[in-house]
Structure formats: structure tokens, C-alpha cells
Amino acid sequence: MTRKTDDVVSRRKFLIAAGATGLAGLAGCTEDSVTDSGSSESENSGTGSEGLSGAIDIAGSSTVFPLATAMGERFQKQHPEVNVNLQSTGSGGGFANYFCPGQTDFNNASRPIKSEEEEQCSANDVEPVELKVATDALTVIVNNDNDFIGEGLTVEQLKTIFSAESKPTVWSDVDESWPDEEIEIFGPTDASGTYDYFIEAIIGEEGPGHRQDYSATEQDRTIVQGVEGSKYAIGYMGYAYYSENTDAVQAVAIDDGDGYVEPSLDTALSGEYTPLSRPLFTYPAKESLAEEHVAEFARYWMENSTSKEIVADEVGYVPLGDDEQSEMLDKLESAIEDAN
């Protein structure tokens, strides 16, 4: 296990606090918690005209939330008459309650859209456009005083801990050499894409499912606080939130059969950190892309999706490669053309 990773650099302290921000808008969280970093000359500024105005409503993944916040903050500095309203609802909650009913322009997601969500969108004449924005290293965390796990956990041990079938109550149920102490589990709700991805990667989509006797929340800071508060706690979340709390909790190295690998930007990029590295997405509604300010924000996000400064150093995810960015920009431009 590790409390620090080599690529944890200076990142903004608003990431955790911002996770609780509702549809009050980006301007509110910016006022309270964003440092005056300005816009770097290396950042792309979009291709549209000056004088953009209007509202952009975004819901969805708590994992993608800090990246959307960073992009929205910068876009608003360049276009102060544009109001980016952003809330963290979970990937599924965003699709079901906001995006597919036609109430938001974008939905962020930490897993691909599901077929039933596509059907709901279609029924409301909403056409989602899938854009990959980064890669995450989903991170399992334990208390800093946990001294019994050792090198880390195997995928099979993770499955045992979180499966609805096994549901061990004490750590010694997982490994007899571990303490006879209750396992306290913290994690995202079933509206979260992180929850869905964890089932797919660890428990198996055809398996017994995720155990439900745990402390579920859509606020990653609550997961951190829960694990920090108990020596025998465990939880999981996106890497960006862990990277802001390396003094509070430990990240667990995972063994997928080839030895223990710690979560980091480097191991996610190299493909070593399996099976918990994953793509992150935003889904603009094609219909919303007919509005110039919405289309320009989507362009701005994609044009800066390769930015190490924003995506890696500030937020804590792996940026897109040049080929991926080109593919996403082509897809976006085609959707904008179709919308108009």
C-alpha cells in the first residue's frame, strides 16, 4: 500500500469540496474555492466567435465533476457571459433524471451509456454524443493505520469483500491471518458509474452483484472521511479524489495476477493497473450543440483534453493522446454540423 505516489503534484483543494456543489452553478464554487490561476497560454481557447452568452447545464458523474469544473472555470474566464451550471449526481442519476429528460446539455459519465438510457433519451428526442475526456485509475483506499493487508489486495479478495454472495463481516473471513474485526465499507451509490464499473471489473456483470450492507454516498469526501475514521474501513473512488487526500488515507495496490500494482497516472497510462483503469466520458446532447455557446464549450473541452497541466497536474487523470483527441474532435464536429 502507499500513502504517496510519484505523480501526486500540486492540485487544487477545491476538488473534494466541489463534489457537494449542486445546480447552483460553477460560479458559486469558483468564488469560494478556485485559486486565481488564470488561463495558461498553452490552453486552447476554442474556435468560435467572441461575445458568447447563455447557460450550459451539466449533470452526471462525481468522478468527472472536477475535470468538468476545471474546464468550465477556464471557459467562463474567456466568456464571462456564459454561465456553466454544474452538479454531481452520479452517472446514472444524471442520465435518468436530467439528461435523458432533456433538462441538461451534457451528462458526465465514468462508464459508457447503457442501452436503457439510450432508449430513454431517444423517447425524449435527445441524442447523446459520446466523447472520451480522460482515463482514471479507480482507487481502493484503507485507513492509514491498517497494517495487516501488507502489499495490497488481489482481485479475488476484493470480490470476496464486496460481493453480495460472500459478504464477509470481519477481516479474518477474507484472510484468516487478518484481524477478527468488523469490515466497515464505504462506497458510491448504485447511481454512480464508479459503482457500475467496479461491478464490471471486480465482481462481474453476471455475478451476484454488489453487497448492499455498506455506507453508500455520492459524495467522495464522505467516503474519505469514513475510511479515515476507522482502522478497519475500506472504500473506493476515482483517483483524483484520492490524490487530494494522500495524507488522510492509503491507496491499495491491486494484484490482477501479475503482481501488486499501485494506482497512479503512470500505471493507468501504461495499462499495468488492471482491471481498475477506465475511460471517462462526457455526453453532449446533439440538439444542444446547435447553440453556439454550447458547441464552443464542447470544442474547448476537447481541444484541451490533451493538456497535462489541466487533466493530469491539476485534476489527477490521464489526458487523451493526440490520436484519441483527433477522433473525438472529428466526432464532435460531425455532431455540430448535423445539429445545424
Image: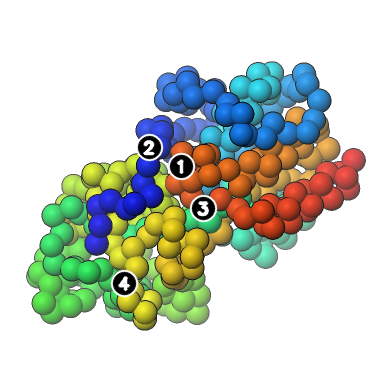
Q: How is the image coloured?
A: rainbow
Q: Which residue is mark 1?
A: 313
The number of callouts visible is 4
Q: Judge from the rendering whether residue 269 lies leftward or rightward of residue 170; answer left or right.
A: right
Comes first in the chain, label 4 or label 1: 4
Separation of residues labelled 3 and 2 (CA atoms): 15 Å
Query: For this view, does 294 lie left or right of residue 248?
Result: right
As helix, strand or loop, the secondary structure at mark 4 comes to strand
Q: Nearer the viewer, residue 280 or 306?
A: 306
Q: Nearer the viewer, residue 289 or 244?
A: 244
Callouts 4 and 2 close, C-beta under 8 Å: no
Residue 38 vertical position relative to residue 232 in the rendered view, above or below = above
**Residue 171 percent location from the top left of the image:** 17, 70
> Looking at the image, can residue 226 be seen?
no
Query: Can you give x and y, in whole percent of width and height, for residue 3 in the image?
Result: 25, 52
Q: Quadrant location of residue 169?
A: bottom left
Q: Is residue 235 above or below residue 217?
A: below
Q: Quadrant of residue 293?
A: top right
Q: Is residue 250 above or below residue 85?
A: below
For the N terminus, which image quadrant? bottom left
Point out the image quarter for the C terminus.
top right
Label located before the other in sequence (4 or 3):
4
Q: Earlier in the sequence, mark 1 or mark 3?
A: 1
Check whether the beta carbons of the residues at disc 3 and disc 2 lie within 8 A of each other.
no
Residue tagged by mark 2? Answer: 10
Q: Is residue 277 above or below residue 177?
A: above
| Residue type for callout 2 | Ser
Mark 4, residue position = 260
Q: Residues within 10 Å of mark 1 (few under 14, many from 20)?
A: some
